[in-house]
Image: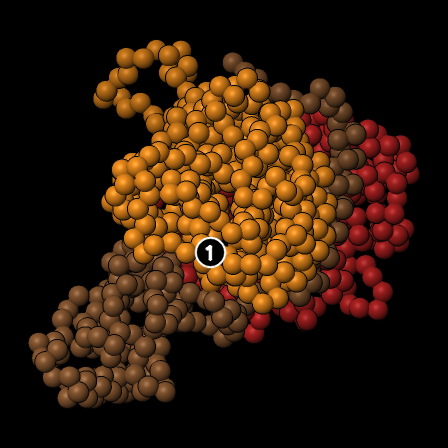
Chain colours: A orange, B red, C brown
Amino acid sequence: MPVSPEKPSTLSTVEILSQGMVINVGPQHPSTHGVLRLILTLDGEQILQCEPVIGYLHRGLEKMMERRPYRHNIPFTDRLDYLAALSNNLGICQCIERLGGVEVPERAKYIRVLLMELQRIASHLVFLGTFGTDLGATTMFLYAFREREMVLDLLEECTGARLTYNWIRVGGVPDDLPEGFGEKVLAFVKLFRERIEEYDQLLTRNRIFRSRTQGIGVLPKEMALAYGVSGPVLRASGVAYDIRKVDPYEVYDRVEFEVPVFDRGDVWARYLVRMEELRQSLRIIEQVLRDMPDGPVQTKLPKIFKPPAGIAYSRVESPRGELSFMMVSDGSPNPVRVHIRAPSFVNLSVLPRLLEGAKVADLVAILGSIDVVLGEIDR
Amino acid sequence: MIGAVAPFFQQYPLLWTFVKAVVLASFTLVIPLAVIWVERKVAGFIQSRLGPLHVGPQGTLQTVADALKLLLKEDIVPAGADKRFFYIAPYIAFISTVLSFMVLPFAPGWVALEMNVAVLFVIGVSLFNVVSILMAGWSSNNKYSLLGGLRAVAQLLSYEIPMVLSVLAVVFYTGSLSLTGIIEYQVKHGWNIWHPPIMIAALIYFICALAEINRTPFDLPEAESELVSGFNTEYSGMRFAFFFASEFANNFFITAFAAALFFGGWDGPVLPPMVWTFLKVFVMIFVFMWVRWTPPRLRIDQILRFAWQLLVPVSLLNLLFAIALGVK
Amino acid sequence: MKRIATDEKYNPLLYFIDGLTTMFFGMLVTWRNLWRPKITVRYPYQRRPVPPRYRGLFYLKWNEEKQRLNCVGCTLCAQACPTDVISMVKLGKGTNAGVSEFTMDLGRCMFCNLCVEACPFDAIYMGPIYELASERRDAALFRITDLAQGGEEAVRKNIETIQRLLAEEEKANPAESAHSAGGHAS
């Protein structure tokens, strides 16, 4: 803004030059992936300071949950991380199961793992697509979403919904897999293996893509641990921490898979971790379909579910990181206190540190590589 | 046809100039409609989509409808904008494109202005584009636009140099500054692209052309995902349409220029010369689109580093090479 | 200030050659996709097949054998609903009870399937209809005539059947059902 002659500025030229330009990114910006607002202070193309502003999507979910019986809260968790609704469903159901001491039938556990990994693929494909567009590779977006549609079609056939599935229940899953579901999933797995190769050829090996991601937004291991980040962001910084391995739930201790870990800690490593997780998810899906036993899928529970007084904490590895629920019961049908540890919220807290000294163009790469979902951050 | 009407008009040089100007200006307005439609279809097909379908057969009239919509929209000028520059920036962009078309030979005799320094003229007027982008970015009084404008100027100026050097290689090689002269040389001696120094020049020209018309991987000035369309963020309606039209007309021009410099212009067997020109142009436009929809975009420092550390020295060396080989 | 870590071994020419080759392979991918069948579904003209479990607009199941809706007005679905979508008016009492009014405010509905799972009488289901958007707020309010399989005709028959059954029951057992003729709202 030019200084108007009527009101002469008291700042000297040096002071004006050293202030930097404040620019507002979001809440309606194509690359903030939702309603995130970032207040950037720029020196030319260089970012001096970044201040994230959140809360545009706040709905008071934790309080809403305290006003409702336990099982009514499951559909609300769909709206937390809306790209991985099933992971959230599983998180809250595990918490309620621990609170009430509910046993889950074997087959239900396998179905849960199968759905979880399909969900992880769908979620990572959104990351891949939006990350591609952020960097300018618009075509990648459509390819990733094309394959995501296939996963959504599978999940739709199983659960009946395409985004807010709500298909995990306390004590199992509501219904068995539909007829011929396994074959369809295996056909998808086969096709998707080829498509991952194609993504690699189109994007991962591309020199421009590598130049744009390598050495950008480096998150050292110590800082990652200090900020408490989790999920692919943490694993890209060289910490082999995956809830599926360190605190196995459902049947993750019975399937073979690797946790990809990279030491670089940059945007490139975060991307590679997610790409490798796609492959590992396919492995898990194949094993789960092979080993799945027959049997019931849901434990019968009383109509009014009153867990004994106590406190329960459960954590799952959502596609974004460590998602945990804590519930306190006093023996009544409603929880007294619900707390959600949303991985995106914690991961976002490291963003200002990553952006110091980055270029404006790196902002979208770094923000995209953290892969935040605002529904989860604002709750 | 041109032979039939030309003698009549040549009695009245001013009228003749006026007719040519009108024809070229309307051509510059019409050609983007076709190019944009092709772009959308190619983009759609590459991305497993179908592209526009509804207006006209296969959506051919979609861009016409879009252009009409833009012309009818309210012309919004931001309150803080520097109005004079904001108003004229799109027209400068458009005029610089129309001016470049003036010296473009489509077929033997089909050139609005036969100029013996046509190449120099093209390089001169295409620089107006940079001015218009800077004006748009600065006068919008929008920080995103400003960043986009700054990026655009840094990028366009950096790539103008290797581009001019590679064009100069052709000039020295063929010994002519006139586009018609260059094409006629190629008709006699075979297309320039088959000669080693010009091959490298063509590659450099191709890369610089991508940068000049702001295509991925060099589409930083309008980086959709970072700068929300960059220098033209604040433009709407007709003024935006002029920016858009000049961008795509430029796309057409830069390929037609390349066809004249490297691919023998109208030269080709069997088909009439005009058809050959358009065929070459559209094949090249397709390649540009194909490139556009493949890679991510570079960062500003990488783009400038690439231009100054590689393209400029290589094109200089190549120029020496071309001079050494081309001296007759 | 932390500087951007650039690759130490930056070599313009090698980078350029690498760029050209990887670009070429990338363009092969886009070229392949140029000729692949397109996945666009031209929506208003073409539609995707809807799987049997699809959670669309609700319907109340019509029982052809008994000539009535399966719903007995037990309100279990209304109790299972987290957002209070369902309200109903019960008709009669006991084994032959039914509903005369069943209203769902889908403006609040999450399509979470909890009501369907709560129903012990196979009365409420979710169907394949998904085009529920409207310009009017009251269009989200679905009454029993919109929800019942068979529409108004079915609702009329349903009430007839239930009233007949209730009348028969009353004849057989007059003392017990005397005060429940009017039904009660939930």
* Residue C119 image point, x, y percent: 34, 66
* Amino acid type, label 1: Gln
Using the image, determine if residue A154 lies above or below residue C149: above
Residue A56 visible in rendering? no
Q: Residue B319, located in which quarter of the rendered image?
A: top right
**Number of numbered discs overlaid on the protein picture:** 1
* Residue A112 image point, x, y percent: 53, 50
**Chain letter for mark 1:** A
* Residue A195 image point, x, y percent: 69, 52
Instruction: Please name the residue shown 90% across and 36% down the image.
Output: B325
In the rendered structure, the answer to whether residue A227 lies left or right of residue B305 reads left
Residue A349 visible in rendering? yes
Residue at image mark 1? A298
Dividing the image into 4 quarters, which one contains the C terminus of chain B? top right
Q: Nearer the viewer, residue A67 or B232?
A: A67
Estimate how packed mark 1 is, as few (under 14), some (14 to 19) or many (20 or more) residues with alpha carbons within 10 Å. Answer: many
In the rendered structure, the answer to whether residue A46 lies left or right of residue B200 reads left
Q: SS class of the residue under badge 1?
A: loop
In the rendered structure, the answer to whether residue B180 lies left or right of residue A266 reads right
Instruction: Please name the residue shown 39% across and 46% down the image.
Output: A77
Q: Nearer the viewer, residue A253 or B95?
A: A253
